[in-house]
Amino acid sequence: MRTTVRTTSGVALACVASVLLTSIAAATPTPGAPGVGDPYYPNDGNGGYDVSHYDIRLTYQPSTDLLSGTTTISLTTTQELSRFDLDFALRAKSVLVDNVPATFSANTDGHGELVVTPARPLPSGKQVTVAVSYADTPSTAKIDGVSTWKRTPDGALGVDEPNSAPWWYPSNNHPTDKATFDVNVEVPDGLSALSNGTLLRTSKNRAGWTRWWWRSTQPQATYLTSLEVGNFEVIRQTTPDGKPFITAYDSDLGDSLGAAKASLERTPEIIEFLASQFGPYPFEAQGGVVSDGITFSLENQTRPVYGSVNFRYGANTSLIAHENAHQWFGDSVSVGRWSDIWLNEGFATYAQYLWSEHTGEGTADELAQYTYDRIPATDPFWQVLPSNPGPDKQFDNAVYDRGALTLHALRKAVGDDTFFRILREWTSSKKGKTGLISEFVALSEKVSGKPLQELFRTWLYTAGKPAVGPNGPSFGAAKALVEPKSFKQIEAAHHLG
């Protein structure tokens, strides 16, 4: 009996010791991961914390490209942290963690990591305030040998995809960590500093300078947070349903100004139509910026930016439909990983089909069939898989065009009512979150009650031109197709963002 008691007691003590050691090991602070593990961009984002808000307060001098100020980040730790990373390409002057100076160093491998070591380790679940002060010239800063900061004759653009944030503010730079934003930027008088959301005010604290204050109240990805500085004509209006509606036009647009205004000023009308297809508009403001400093267009949240070249032939409302469709597909519901880019670009391109149908410039049936017919089976286009195009083909035409054909094939397979119910359920259930292609496929099967694996496998996952077009086997033979009137605009626009 005594022997049994001793043995049992020894086992118990050993178990207690094991539990204590495990607990101590689990409580030992460790560094946050320097990336979220995205298969295309493994260094993007960081582990160990979740950001809730960015307050970005800057001064920018275009003549010297000097950008200076402080970004204050509100975050919550998700593990015991000995140190953590921020994605940042510029030179930091100081870093405070909960008002205490922290040790920091730029990562010397050129991947744009600001490594921060707090004075004391941070426990898991702690709300933390990080203030990073900096001053640098963004056009000279490189990440993996690249800069996405764009200087213009009178300003600069912090605009690009998939990365633009590290050249003007430190962040957890991946769509899986969205946050709200306050952006206020001081620029020389006569210039504008444009960003996302609502313009709260402009103010002057010293001669020769004006500060612009912007606020975004809905979850927003870092790459969709934009800064455009320059000599813009800024027009402030209100949409019919009461939302702030701000558009801005570069002073150098020349003969394209009229066409640009004839396009952007119809944004509320186009958004109203898109809302009838996709569900309620997900954000608090609308607008757009036209710049001569870029050739592409990008769906910055609430306020897309458009390269002026896209209006050289006249009004281009098809492009406005594309970029504003992204407000649902890409902005409100963002990619869970960059290989899921079809969820952004295929849907925005299909929105152009819907807008064309709405305006009487070619039905979705016609546009889809024309796209399918005009690209021969031998074209390399059909070898790019929209489901996983690879980082070098992430914005390939196939992601846009074959992506749109996939949606049209889905629409024909399940019928209009079910198709649009799928889209609305997706935007509603995923609002403010992220999504994966596999989740959209599962939702489509759930809502339709049909097996759709083969359809998606054919259009998204299989190299080669599908044997049957998006309208089914008989559509192309039944009628001679004429190029839809809007196709030239679509061709010029839908590869751009």
Image (cartoon, rainbow, N blue to C red):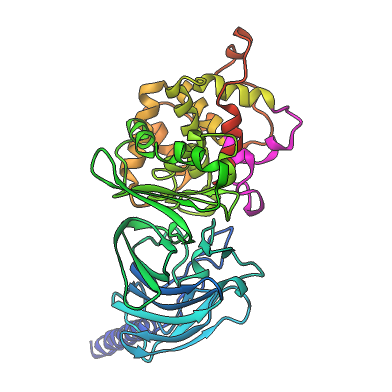
Q: Quadrant of the N terminus?
A: bottom left
How far across and down, in percent of the image, does residue 458 sit? 59, 31
Asked where in the image residue 457 lies, by quadrant, the reply is: top right
Task: Classify 476 as above or below 491.
Answer: above
Q: Is residue 219 visible?
A: yes
How far across and down, in percent of the image, does residue 368 sit? 56, 24
Q: Which residues are magenta?
A: 375-402
Return the residue nearer the eye: 192 or 272.
192
Residue found 52% across the figure and 38% down from its top:
346
Magenta highlight on residue 111: no
How far across and down, in percent of the image, does residue 99 sit? 31, 87
Return the residue nearer the eye: 185 or 275.
185
Task: Classify 365 as above or below 277.
Answer: above
Considering every residue shown, the one lying at the far right of the view is 378
Magenta highlight on residue 395: yes
Task: Classify 242 as above or below 404.
Answer: below
How far across and down, in percent of the image, does residue 271 sit? 36, 37
Q: Is residue 386 visible?
A: no
Considering every residue shown, the one lying at the far top of the view is 478
Residue found 40% across the figure and 39% down from its top:
265
Asked where in the image residue 171 lies, by quadrant, the reply is: bottom left
Q: Is residue 339 left or right of residue 54?
A: right
Return the residue nearer the eye: 340 or 308.
308
Return the residue nearer the eye: 313 or 337.
313
